[in-house]
Image (cartoon, rainbow, N blue to C red):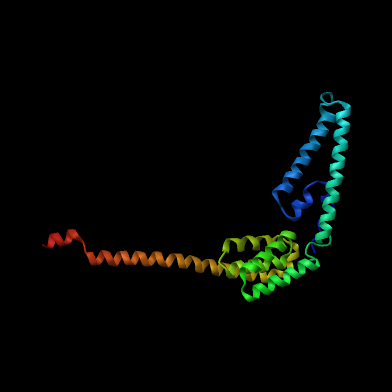
Amino acid sequence: MCRMPWTLYLWPGLPQLWIRGTWHALAVAVLAAVALNFALLGTFGFSELMAPQVRSFLWVGLGMAWALAATFSLVMNRRRGVWQGGTERDATTENDFGEATEHYLKGNWFEAERLFTAILHENPRDPEARLTLATLLRRTGRLDEVRSHLDTLGRLEDARKWQCEIQTEYELLAEAEDGSLAEKTIPNEEEDRDEEVEASELGDPAAEHDAA
């Protein structure tokens, strides 16, 4: 199982950036860095530009923000099972996964995709849900999205036990891409052939004029 390093909780935004890779988590982490650098600069670099009361207030505020961010991340991640490994599902999510799998087996692609997407929204590191969604997308012809999901699976330690299935999906994806390319090429070849036949039937106007 892939455990998230506990040191990530020491910096606001990094736990969410590790788990979800979202832009707002990156923004929080960057803003925390800017605020800390500003406090350090005002304390040790240009202390004359900042009153002692302001510096004290700034450090207290930063300390409280750091503590609240760490507590919030820890509580939310424990609820999702991330601290314990990242792929554990609660009862509700397990029910959703079972329902999504049932829809997938019945060919109800829309409902299955909706449920698998919701599961991955709660826990993006769920390899089984992501792999099944990739298979669904391949069956519905959305090949670019399939490759994106498979590449994500390749970066997850929790997906190691699914390597055979992932490799099989890559091979099936390559076959589907080749088939899609062939379908695009054949009509073009037929159009060129039709144009050649039409030109031969019409003949060369200059040659006919010389013969006359």
Give how far across and how far down residue 74 sits, in percent: 84, 53
Residue 44 is situated, as x and y percent measured from the top left of the image, at 85, 30
Residue at the extreme bottom of the image, as rendered: 106
Q: Quadrant of the N terminus?
A: bottom right
When the figure is inspected, residue 59 is found, relative to residue 136, above or below; the finding is above
Locate residue 56 relative to residue 181 in the image: left or right.
Answer: right
Q: How many marks?
A: 0
The image quarter containing residue 20 is: bottom right
Of the pair 23 and 114, the residue shown nearer to us: 114
Question: Which residue is located at x 25 percent, y 66 percent?
Answer: 200
The residue positioned farthest toward the left in the image shown: 212
Q: Judge by depth and name the residue closer to the eye, 26 or 163.
A: 26
| Residue that appears at 89% across and 32% down | 56
Q: Is residue 46 found left or right of 107 in the rendered image?
A: right
Residue beneath the point at 66% across and 73% down:
103
Quadrant location, the C terminus? bottom left
Q: Is residue 182 left or right of residue 36?
A: left
Q: Is residue 99 above or below residue 50?
A: below
Q: Is residue 27 above or below residue 163?
A: above
164 on left or right of 91: left
Q: Position of residue 70 (x, y in %)?
A: 84, 49
Residue in the picture at 86% in, 50% down:
71
Q: Quarter of the image holding residue 116?
A: bottom right
Residue 210, x across and y down, in percent: 13, 60
